[in-house]
Image (spheres, rainbow, N blue to C red):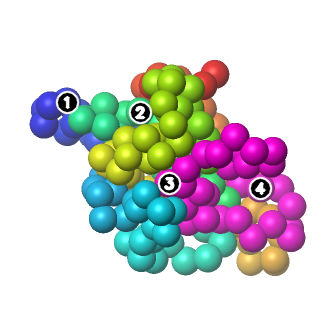
Amino acid sequence: MKEETRNYEEIINNFIKNINAKYVTQEPTFNSLEDVVNLDGKNVLSSLDTLSKSKLGLYIFKDDGLIVYIGKGGTGRTETSTSDLKDRIGEELREHKDVGGNDSQTLSKNIKSENRISGVDSVEIIQRFTLAVIPMGDRFNEHGKLNIKLMRTAEILELALISQFNPKYNKT
């Protein structure tokens, strides 16, 4: 698995460099979620503190060396939205509950659906994943306007990576 893991990281890094390197502010490294995700929902997101507010970008979850989910954060198109990359990752680490208006925990929801398990069990699965964060820049440009071009780039990069790796928990 180590060789396979290295190849994924190398492929992703090369893919990012070749697609649009000027938008990616750092290469992704995969970090354990064991000490981040808590079953009570009080996750410890301090490991993501390097992501300042109002960032946008991508995140990639791996399980046992395989990419299992790719998502984006900070690409909301309203100027009043405060959800950024760190917020979106935090939402993905929580349990999805089957109540109206609670669709932000897409990873948990897809794990529940795929494996026919409870929300708590889905969070236990997420706990063993590793996470790579790919910050791409600020949600707002120097004039205080939404950085639509960068948001579109993040959306295209997300779709390209999903197409390339076909992660188990990304639904199409």
Asked if residue 86 is positioned above or below residue 11 in the image, the reply reads: below
Residue sitting nearer the eye, 81 or 29:
81
> What amino acid is found at the position of numbered circle 3 in the picture?
Leu
* Residue underneath mark 4: 76
Q: Is residue 114 above or below residue 91?
A: above
Secondary structure type for disc 4: loop
Report x, y in % for residue 131: 37, 51
Residue 113 or residue 18, whichever sits in front: 113
Mark 3: few/some/many CA within 10 Å (<14, 14-19, 20+): many
- Crowding at dot 1, Cα within 10 Å, few <14 / some 14-19 / many 20+, comes out as few
The first of marks 3 and 2 along the sequence is 2
The magenta stretch spans which residues? 75-104
Left or right for 14, reference 18: left
Q: Nearer the viewer, mark 4 or mark 2?
A: 2
Q: Earlier in the sequence, mark 1 or mark 2?
A: 1
**Dividing the picture into quarters, in which one does residue 100 lie?**
top right
Which label lies toward us, 1 or 2?
2
Question: In the drawing, what numbered circle is on residue 93?
Answer: 3
Mark 4 vs mark 2, CA separation in Å: 23 Å
